[in-house]
Image: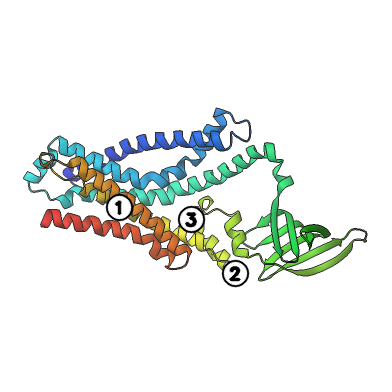
Amino acid sequence: MGALSRYLLLAALGGVATAMSAVLAAILLIDLVEQMRSVGARVDLSMGQAASLTLMKAPILIEQTLPFVVLVGVMIGMIQLNRRSELIAMRAAGVSAWRFTTPAILSAFVIGAAVITALNPIGSKLYAEFEVRRDALLSQRLGPPQERGVWLRQGDEFGQVVIQADALDPQTAVLTNATFFFFALQGDVLRFERRMRVESAELRSGFWQLNGVVEGAPGEAPQRQETLAIPTNLDASDLLERFVSPATLSFWSLPSFIAEARAAGLSPLRFEIKWSSLVAYPFLLAAMAALGGVFSLRMQRLGNIAAWGGLGVGLGLGLFFFSQLSQALAITEAVPPLVAAFAAPLAGLFCALGIMCFLEDG
């Protein structure tokens, strides 16, 4: 890398650092207020505890806002060069706009790769700890976690079944130390009918496979059975999505989790979308850097720099909404997750390159 490329790279990174400082301070303050509002409204939450919860979410918040930080940061760095007339001097020396933007694009790609391989595992672990800490604080009002356990409900036109268990393995859809409460519908009233305590209950296609069953009903002696199957309208994939958050799984652990869930007959669609979006993340940052560079190269003497910058920010927001739309289409299985993840980054890159070709080469 030559001296000019290093200088342009430092200018872009300086702008990104400036934007990151402002955005990070804002999102941490907003999240701190949100923790005081959501958790503090239910339990006695000190400022230190709220700050601890916010810091645990900080890596995830950085990962989510970094595309906009890169977009604005590259624009800040390039506009500063423009105001100091350094871009004019470089253009007069024959330096093309392609060379202006290449260091920022490549550095954004490297930053994206570092985020998904290093920051994302840390953020996922801290976010899982955040959920545990928040639940522990809320349990001061709702009761200890071991008393609450896992609660499920299924029902039809004949009645309902309420299920309580000590633990659930979402990958295998197995409940441990579970109790099934059966309620029959009599008119408009649900009346308790019987109860089953089981050592384990495995959710299969259309039924629960119960092991170590002790069944009891009012006025009757308990009866023990080794195995028993009862019908259900619950789906194992729903349990996977309900009890496991993709944000708590890192880039490195997602592939094995997806493979194990698929081997168990579950649909890990949300986790495939998450992994695909992480793979496409460096390309998204590169696209944002390209857009930031393209929309900040207009010479200051020509005016309308603010309008061009606003157009670049607007296009970046449009790219974000396009990525959300692509993920929604992937959830409905209209497009594959990998296609949905790469649609927005590639669209942004092609848009930036097209504008660059028009401005630079006519």
Of the image marks 1 and 3, the number of the one nearer the N terminus? 3
* Residue located beneath label 2 in the image: 265
In front of the other: 328 or 175: 328
- Mark 2 nearby-residue class (10 Å; few <14, some 14–19, many ≥20): some
Residue 334 percent coordinates (x, y)? 44, 68
- Mark 1 nearby-residue class (10 Å; few <14, some 14–19, many ≥20): many
Q: In this view, does 142 lie to the left or right of 100?
A: right
Q: Which amino acid does label 2 sit on?
A: Gly
In front of the other: 246 or 195: 195
- Circle 1 — which element? helix
Residue 139 percent coordinates (x, y)? 67, 40
Q: In this view, does 315 lie to the left or right of 34?
A: left
Residue 39 percent coordinates (x, y)? 58, 37
* Residue located beneath label 3 in the image: 252
- Circle 2 — which element? loop
Q: Is residue 176 left or right of residue 305?
A: right
- Circle 3 — which element? loop
* Residue located beneath label 1 in the image: 286
* Vertical arrangement, residue 231 with respect to residue 24, above or below: below
Of the image marks 2 and 3, the number of the one nearer the N terminus? 3
**Is residue 112 visible in this depiction of the protein?**
yes
Alpha carbon separation for disc pair 2 and 3:
22 Å
